[in-house]
Image (tube, helix red, strand yellow):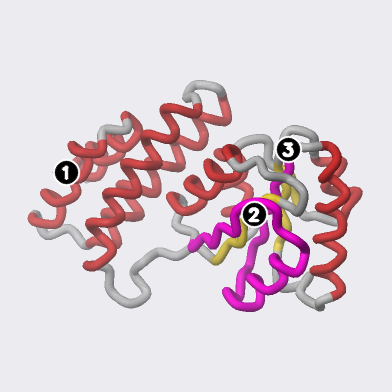
């Protein structure tokens, strides 16, 4: 377990080179790739998310951890057996139509991937039908809608309504985020939840699995 503790600490510090070496050493020592992923890496990103939420870590540090995580997962992926990939679920994420902002969305996407979700990032300026097509194609369980402009908030409601009309509402949990929105707006448009930052978005997504 000390191997995993060291991996977790290095991940939090964001040192990708050292992390990749530690992961390779853990593999050489006979640890199962799935255990390294879940007990060393994903548990480390959980801590990163908590520290981001509490204000102990800031976006540049979180990005370094997420990028280190990505490199370490790249080492493990070819070694993970069937059913060992620790996929927590499938997430569709995108900025709604009329909005071209993506920095926050990109960070949420990285945190979700680091938490073990399979993430399909649709990018920016997505019409409701873009989300619906992706939900069907990926058989997604969570949809995350992002907006930074007050003028695109109504498009979030249109997207939620379209998901309902398509008969997919029971299949997915809908999560919203962005500067102008909050939990009361999420309630108003029929979404399941709101997250203020990438750490809380990842935690909220995990809570939907239980």
SS for dot 2: strand
Q: From this view, report whether residue 78 is shown above or below residue 182.
A: below
Is tag 3's residue or tag 1's residue first in the polypeptide sequence?
Answer: 1
Of residues 4 and 140, the one nearer the viewer is 140
When asked about the image quadrant of residue 34, the answer is bottom left
- The stretch of residues the image draws in magenta is 118-147
Q: CA distance from mark 1 to mark 2?
A: 34 Å
Q: What residue do we see at 44% from left, 33% from top? A: 62
Of residues 193 and 98, the one nearer the viewer is 98
Q: Badge 1 is on which residue? A: 22
Q: Badge 3 is on which residue? A: 148
Total label count? Answer: 3
In this rendering, position of residue 183 left or right of residue 140: right
SS for dot 1: helix
Residue 150, given in percent of the width and then of the height, sits at 84, 37
Q: CA distance from mark 3 to mark 1?
A: 39 Å
In this rendering, position of residue 160 left or right of residue 46: right
Q: From this view, report whether residue 83 is shown above or below residue 66.
A: below
Q: Badge 2 is on which residue? A: 94
């Amino acid at each position: 377990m000390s191997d995993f503790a060291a991996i977790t600490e290095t991940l939090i510090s964001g040192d990708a080179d050292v992390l990749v070496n530690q992961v390779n050493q853990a593999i050489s020592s006979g640890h199962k790739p799935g255990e390294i992923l879940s007990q060393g890496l994903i548990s480390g990103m959980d801590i990163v998310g908590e520290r981001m939420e509490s204000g102990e870590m800031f976006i540049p540090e979180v990005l370094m951890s997420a990028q280190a995580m990505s490199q370490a997962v790249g080492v493990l992926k070819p070694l993970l057996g069937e059913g060992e990939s620790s996929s927590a679920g499938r997430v569709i994420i995108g900025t709604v139509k009329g909005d071209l902002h993506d920095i926050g969305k990109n960070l949420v996407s990285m945190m979700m991937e680091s938490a073990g979700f399979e993430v399909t990032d649709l990018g920016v300026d997505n019409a409701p039908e873009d989300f619906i097509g992706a939900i069907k194609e990926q058989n997604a369980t969570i949809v995350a809608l992002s907006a930074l402009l007050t003028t695109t908030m109504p498009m979030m409601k249109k997207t939620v309504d379209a998901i309902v009309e398509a008969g997919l509402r029971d299949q997915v949990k809908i999560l919203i985020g962005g500067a102008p929105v909050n939990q009361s707006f999420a309630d108003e448009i029929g979404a399941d939840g709101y997250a203020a930052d990438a750490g809380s978005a990842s935690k909220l997504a995990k809570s939907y699995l239980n």
